[in-house]
Image (spheres, rainbow, N blue to C red):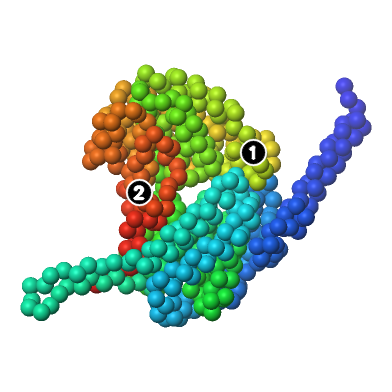
């Protein structure tokens, strides 16, 4: 038995080690990443240790100071001073004044300004991609890919600026005709989410600006550095062309700024990307003032696999759709509905594919899977798995929080749940996929459509008759209907958005530009 002196000595050693560990942790937390040589590239984006988060032709910020946290390390990157109510009022007044000049510029010339913004983004693509990777947690190719989406929509908007078309209709009155005219709305507000902190604003702003609108942007509270860096790129183009910077204003902040935007009648259209719950609240506030809103909300997306599907293609696609971006895309696959004849084979091969995923620092080359965005997401991951097991699910891969710095969890596959189990019907924004066994495609379509959200879906089959059914009136009821490709991802040429609890909004291509204009006859 140890003597009292030995016990006291052991306790002192433990306390000393604990104190040393705590001191090291406190030191790491007090040191900003931007101050370290490894992250000096952040300054090439115009960022510093302390940044102002409000822009309307000049940089301001008198609200609370927020700290951006790197999800891969759980360490602070830099500080941003958010906007106060007075900052918001100054910004929207300047934005409203800027519209008077912007709307007088011919549409093709506005399109050329948007083109220049795309070119400026090209020059900063790698740096912005690294910042997105650092602040969001997505891997570097996805961070750069997000900037490329903004660039692509700028290119698209250039051509669109010469193609806004109305119609001329015959009139029943002698010597008259009916003319359909499209005009810009004025101020378009954008509230974007953490998972696409650059691209979502780009989809909205490039088209809206070409239409003749001015922008008021509130990025996600946890990705303020991306908002500041992107706005710096845009403002440099506006300044070079002697256009008011308030054409693209930024007010960083939390729910208080979002509510001001939702209630403000000067915001003619409010585009909101985020959860179904918050989106519903936003829509009610905007609707109460008879304003326009565009909602891009959640998606409980499904991949349906028929018995004749190419299994190699299924496994590759499911791996990307389920585990890509650590399951934090609105289009990530949450449900994998497999024909009973291929169920076991697909699960077995998918488990092997998951085991080969390289987990690591999202900025490093070769990393395929990064962290969750914050600790709240880790908590939701654990709670979802507890619910799944309580409802009869069995974890066949993953299920653990990784013992390393950052918000890392294992990508997870769960089998054995009923198609209408409570947890299956709930969208959880984490890398968990629920595998369901169906008897045929008709049953799978019913299961696909029973989710409250209706964003993205995909059917894997070689049967043309099933494909026709899948894309037809008795097929998938989602806004994005895929064949033999993952649910995640979209192309800028088509309208992007979903039905039901996803909100019904459409962004990007096709005739989505009409959302940013008003029609007169």
User: Measured from the top left, where is residue 175 in percent x and y?
Assistant: 10, 79
Instruction: Kindly tell me whether residue 364 is visible in this rendering.
Output: yes
Q: Nearer the viewer, residue 94 or 205?
A: 205
The residue that mark 1 highlights is: 366
Residue shown at the point (20%, 73%) measured from the top left: 179
Q: Hey, which quadrant is residue 185 in on the image? A: bottom left
Left of 454 or right of it: where is 72?
Answer: right
Q: Quadrant of the N terminus?
A: top right
Q: Callout 2: helix, strand or loop?
A: loop
Left of 499 or right of it: where is 86?
Answer: right
Instruction: Kindly tell me whether residue 8 is visible in this rendering.
Output: no
Residue shown at the point (29%, 67%) measured from the top left: 165
Q: Which marked residue is nearer to the observer: mark 1 or mark 2?
A: 1
User: Measured from the top left, where is residue 209 in percent x and y?
Assistant: 43, 68
The residue that mark 2 highlights is: 498
Q: Which mark is residue 23?
A: none
Q: Hey, which quadrant is residue 355 in on the image? A: top right
Residue shown at the point (37%, 18%) measured from the top left: 341
Q: Earlier in the sequence, mark 1 or mark 2?
A: 1
């Amino acid at each position: 038995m140890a003597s009292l002196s030995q016990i006291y000595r052991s306790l002192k050693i433990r306390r000393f080690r604990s104190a040393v560990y705590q001191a090291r942790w406190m030191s790491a937390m007090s040191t900003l990443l931007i101050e370290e040589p490894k992250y000096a590239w952040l300054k090439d984006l115009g960022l510093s240790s302390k940044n102002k988060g409000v822009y309307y032709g000049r940089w301001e910020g008198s609200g609370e100071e927020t700290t951006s946290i790197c999800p891969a390390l759980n360490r602070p990157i830099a500080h941003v001073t958010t906007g106060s109510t007075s900052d918001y009022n100054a910004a929207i007044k300047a934005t409203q004044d800027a519209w008077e000049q912007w709307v007088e510029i011919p549409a093709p010339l506005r399109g050329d300004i948007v083109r220049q913004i795309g070119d400026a983004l090209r020059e900063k693509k790698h740096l912005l991609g690294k910042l997105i990777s650092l602040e969001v947690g997505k891997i570097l190719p996805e961070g750069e890919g997000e900037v490329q989406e903004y660039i692509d929509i700028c290119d698209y908007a250039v051509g669109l600026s010469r193609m806004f078309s109305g119609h001329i209709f015959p009139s029943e009155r002698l010597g008259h005709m009916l003319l359909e005219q499209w005009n810009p709305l004025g101020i378009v507000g954008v509230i974007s989410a953490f998972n696409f902190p650059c691209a979502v604003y780009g989809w909205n702003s490039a088209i809206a600006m070409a239409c003749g609108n001015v922008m008021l942007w509130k990025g996600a509270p946890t990705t303020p550095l991306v908002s500041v860096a992107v706005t710096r790129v845009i403002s440099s183009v506006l300044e070079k062309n002697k256009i008011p910077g308030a054409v693209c204003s930024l007010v960083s902040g939390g729910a208080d700024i979002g509510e001001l935007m939702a209630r403000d009648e000067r915001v003619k259209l409010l585009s909101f990307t985020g959860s179904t719950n918050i989106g519903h609240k936003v829509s009610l506030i905007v609707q109460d003032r008879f304003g326009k809103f565009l909602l891009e909300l959640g998606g409980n997306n499904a991949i349906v696999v028929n018995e004749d599907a190419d299994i190699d293609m299924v496994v590759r696609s499911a791996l990307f759709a389920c585990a890509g971006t650590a399951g934090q895309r609105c289009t990530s696959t949450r449900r994998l509905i497999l024909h009973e004849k291929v169920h076991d084979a697909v699960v077995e091969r998918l488990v092997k594919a998951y085991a080969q995923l390289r987990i690591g620092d999202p900025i490093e080359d070769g990393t395929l899977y990064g962290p969750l965005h914050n600790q709240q997401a880790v908590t939701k991951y654990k709670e979802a798995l507890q619910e799944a097991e309580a409802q009869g699910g069995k974890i066949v891969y993953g299920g653990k929080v990784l013992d390393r710095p950052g918000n890392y969890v294992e990508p997870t596959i769960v089998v054995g749940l009923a198609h209408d189990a409570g947890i299956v019907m709930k969208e959880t924004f984490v890398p968990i996929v629920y595998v369901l066994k169906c008897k045929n495609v008709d049953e799978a379509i019913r299961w696909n459509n029973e989710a409250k959200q209706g964003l993205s879906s995909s059917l894997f089959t070689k049967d043309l008759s099933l494909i026709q059914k899948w894309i037809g009136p008795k097929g998938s009821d989602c806004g994005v209907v895929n064949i033999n490709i993952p649910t995640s991802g979209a192309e800028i040429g088509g309208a992007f958005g979903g039905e039901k609890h996803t909100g019904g909004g459409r962004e990007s291509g096709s005739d989505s530009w009409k959302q940013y204009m008003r029609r007169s006859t």
